[in-house]
Amino acid sequence: MVMVYKNGGIIVGREKNLESLSCTDCSIYNCRSRSNQFPGFCLTTKDNDGHSIADDIEEIKSYLQGDEQDAIVARASAQVEGIFYGKLTRVEEIIEFAKRIGAKKIGIATCAGLIEESKIFADILTARGLEYYSAICKVGSVDKAEIGILEEHKIKPGSHEAMCNPILQARILNYHHTDLNVVVGLCVGHDSLFTKYSDALVTTLVTKDRITGHNPVAALYTAHSYYKKLLQEKE
């Protein structure tokens, strides 16, 4: 089914009912500047499951005006975006953000495959007047077989192959009382566990993607050409 809205919102693809439409079904994005009209399904203006989005928006606005951590982080994030838009690299943005939230000690949760990049990042932090403490993903050197991984599911079956240990990484950085933790290339899922168990706020410097040189958006840019297989439905 194709659903077309007079105010310019066009929905294409699988059949959907009105209640299942969300932000990726929109083509107006009036929430960014309020220069147009909101489509009828807009999450900014509708009620979801009996809970008013308008009430949530007002509640969030109120607690983000105080001096609690969420408010400080929200303002620092917006300031870094607005003041340095298109001017700073991700590395520099993280440093600027850290300083604006008062973070003095940065935790580095690094993939073993990006340890050299993490060393450079650590040097940059030092040069910018920040402390750091790092933990590599293979810390503890626990063989994958010890958590029930079959030998044939290892990269190199029959060898000692240390599991990634994001929970231990988080605990180590917690022990060292880091103020902000930075993920450098943790695997899918391992990054989820690290974030779950980290006491400090977490942001990402590098997202693991072995095929695209850690540039996962490349697969999205080429989804209609080189990576069109991604859009093919699997039975």
Image (tube, rainbow, N blue to C red):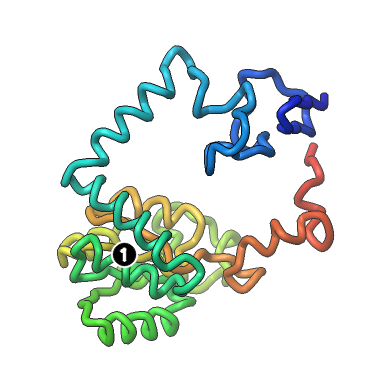
| In-image side of 14 versus 81 (left or right) | right
| In-image side of 3 versus 180 (left or right) | right
Q: Secondary structure at mark 1?
A: helix
Could you say where residue 230 lies in the image, as x and y percent from the top left? 76, 51
Residue 215 appears in the figure? yes
Check the picture and name the quadrant holding the C terminus.
top right
Q: Quadrant of residue 59?
A: top left
| In-image side of 228 versus 184 (left or right) | right
* Mark 1, residue position: 97
As drawn, the residue found furthest toward the front would be 35
Instruction: Tell me the kind of residue under disc 1.
Output: Phe
Could you say where residue 96 lies in the image, as x and y percent from the top left? 32, 70
Q: Quadrant of residue 41?
A: top right
Could you say where residue 194 lies in the image, as x and y percent from the top left? 35, 55
Residue 4 versus residue 208: which sits nearer the camera?
4
Examine the rendered structure and indicate whether residue 134 appears above or below residue 199: below
For the point 78% across and 26% down, which residue is it?
Answer: 4
Residue 141 appears in the figure? no
For the point 41% across and 17% down, which residue is it?
Answer: 51
Residue 48 versus residue 231: which sits nearer the camera?
48
For the point 58% across and 59% down, which residue is it?
Answer: 153
Examine the rendered structure and indicate whether residue 156 appears above or below residue 9: below
As drawn, the residue found furthest toward the top would be 50
Could you say where residue 156 lies in the image, as x and y percent from the top left? 57, 72
Examine the rendered structure and indicate whether residue 70 appears above or below residue 30: below
For the point 39% across and 85% down, which residue is it?
Answer: 120
Q: Quadrant of residue 101?
A: bottom left
Check the picture and name the quadrant holding the N terminus.
top right
Q: Crowding at label 1, few (<14), some or many (≥20) Cα neighbours within 10 Å? A: many
Residue 214 versus residue 210: which sits nearer the camera?
214
Residue 148 versus residue 232: which sits nearer the camera?
232
